[in-house]
Image (spheres, rainbow, N blue to C red):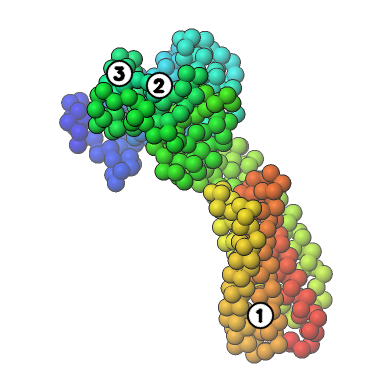
């Protein structure tokens, strides 16, 4: 246990805060008890050894009505680093406990991108109060960032960077950094700009520190670089970092002037958030944040459940059209959901691969046809395998070869349709500039269910129920 925790006599019997990298249940309970008892000193003694990220996790672990009292009890321990690590919904509860002046003090300690993330979650009147409390320079930077579209490079970038001209010497650059850059500023690359402020190259710190001091920047710099337009969507920014293995990248405005920098630590959060967002969209689960308010989660999920209900009625109408065949042979009612279910799973597999390929720019105009043909072949092979297994099973259980062949043909047909739908639905939505991760599952499920029932019941009716009984 941390020695600092032992300094407070009330912490002598406190449990270890972390278990396998997570806050222990006993520790969270102790903090909650101290908060409820109004023991601010005890709260600070327990929490002070924690890393800012763990303090942020502590806020998320507590009930919503305990977050404001915890924020009050922590005092100076609730610093900018903790605020930056907080979940969006948890941050709202914590900021509600702070005055505009206190929020402004926190914001001034944050990088521009983190400061924007804090301020954009505030109500409009609260935003104005916080911005008024900021220094003019900080306010101007944040207001400029807020003018860019949400989830764009302009919101994501930091404005603290090092820019030099190619006519400077290595020693001159080092002297300039020492004289003008805040020691707390983290940077890995130095950007080289022309007289108009447009980036023309980069120079890594390792090159700067190992180059002879009398060399010119022009002799050390690398002229090839990846430039990020200020309006580029953050998902595309993440793809650029992944594709070119970037540590940092210059952000330029419409005139090509250097206005900020994006670093890999910010992109890691984006990759994680975007990947999780796409998965949740596929299921219609909304943000999927366990801290999201109940009513907000209800509204998001209920929309897609209603949509699924409507598409389910389509499948039900297909079944209703063959009610006479089902009445004549009850086995059809038992077997038809299997055809639809397997087709749905096959369609979801293809859909997930397609949505991911679209999100990562793997699927483009140049390889669309090849991808569609590939998925059809995969679906056909899967269909043959499952059709053969299903035919053998039905023949064994029902002792009817005709019924086995009918369900095998229906299953093969539906799995091929599912494979085609799984790739075509996301592609079509993407061409229509709709998010394929949001609506694809509803349409794919409707197609596979309705076509599965139609294929099996239709073939059974066409062959003749009397030959299947």
Question: Residue at point 63% right, 87% down?
Answer: 395
Q: Is residue 370 left or right of residue 451?
A: left
Distance between the alpha carbons at the discs numbered 2 and 3: 11 Å
Q: Mark 1 Cα within 10 Å, few/some/many (few <14, many 20+)?
A: many
First reached walking from the N terminus: tag 3 or tag 1: 3
Question: Residue at point 35% right, 26% down?
Answer: 217
Question: Pointers 3 and 1 in contact (CB under 8 A)?
Answer: no
Dot 3: element: helix
Q: Give the camera-side residue of 341 and 93.
A: 341
> In the image, residue 402 lies at what x, y percent?
71, 88
Q: Give the foreground label among 3 and 1.
A: 3
Please name the residue that numbered disc 1 is placed on: 408
Q: Mark 3 Cα within 10 Å, few/some/many (few <14, many 20+)?
A: some
Please name the residue that numbered disc 3 is placed on: 172
Question: Pointers 2 and 3 in contact (CB under 8 A)?
Answer: no
Please name the residue that numbered disc 2 is placed on: 165
- Relative vertical location of residue 49 with respect to residue 298 in this rendering, above or below: above
First reached walking from the N terminus: tag 2 or tag 3: 2
Question: Residue at point 33% right, 40% down?
Answer: 23
């Amino acid at each position: 246990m941390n020695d600092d925790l032992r300094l407070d006599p009330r912490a002598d019997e406190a449990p270890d805060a972390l278990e396998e990298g997570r806050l222990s249940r006993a520790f969270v309970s102790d903090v909650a008890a101290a908060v409820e008892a109004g023991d601010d000193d005890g709260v600070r003694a327990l929490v002070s050894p924690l890393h800012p990220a763990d303090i942020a996790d502590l806020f998320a672990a507590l009930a919503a009505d305990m977050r404001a009292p915890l924020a009050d009890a922590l005092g100076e321990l609730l610093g900018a680093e903790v605020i930056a690590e907080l979940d969006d919904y948890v941050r709202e509860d914590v900021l509600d406990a702070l005055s505009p002046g206190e929020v402004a003090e926190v914001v001034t300690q944050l990088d521009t991108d983190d400061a924007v993330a804090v301020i954009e979650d505030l109500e409009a009147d609260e935003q104005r109060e916080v911005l008024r409390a900021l220094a003019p320079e900080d306010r101007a930077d944040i207001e400029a960032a807020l003018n860019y579209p949400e989830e764009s490079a302009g919101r994501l970038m930091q404005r603290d960077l090092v820019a030099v001209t190619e006519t400077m010497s290595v020693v001159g650059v080092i002297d300039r950094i020492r004289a003008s850059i805040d020691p707390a500023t983290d940077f890995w690359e130095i950007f080289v700009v022309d007289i108009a402020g447009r980036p023309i190259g980069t120079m890594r710190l390792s090159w700067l520190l190992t180059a002879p001091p009398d060399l010119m920047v022009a002799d050390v710099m690398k002229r090839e670089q990846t430039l990020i337009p200020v309006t580029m969507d953050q998902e595309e920014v993440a793809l650029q970092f992944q594709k070119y293995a970037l540590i940092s990248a210059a952000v330029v405005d419409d005139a090509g002037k250097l206005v900020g920098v994006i670093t890999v630590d910010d992109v890691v959060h984006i990759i994680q958030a975007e990947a999780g967002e796409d998965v949740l969209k596929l299921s219609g689960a909304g943000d999927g944040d366990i801290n999201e308010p109940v009513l907000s989660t209800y509204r998001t999920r209920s929309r897609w459940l209603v949509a699924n209900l409507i598409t389910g009625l389509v499948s039900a109408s297909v079944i209703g059209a063959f009610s006479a065949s089902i009445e004549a042979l009850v086995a059809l009612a038992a077997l038809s959901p299997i055809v639809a279910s397997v087709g749905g799973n096959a369609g979801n597999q293809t859909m997930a691969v397609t949505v991911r390929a679209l999100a990562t720019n793997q699927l483009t105009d140049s390889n669309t046809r090849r991808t569609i043909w590939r998925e059809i072949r995969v679906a056909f092979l899967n269909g043959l395998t499952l059709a053969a297994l299903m035919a053998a099973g039905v023949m064994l259980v029902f002792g009817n070869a005709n019924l086995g062949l009918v369900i095998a043909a229906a299953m093969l047909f539906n799995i091929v349709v599912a494979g085609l739908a799984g790739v075509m639905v996301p592609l079509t939505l993407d061409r229509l500039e709709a998010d394929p991760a949001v609506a694809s599952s509803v349409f794919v499920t409707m197609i596979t269910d309705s076509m599965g029932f139609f294929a099996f019941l239709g073939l059974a009716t066409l062959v003749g129920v009397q030959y299947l009984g």
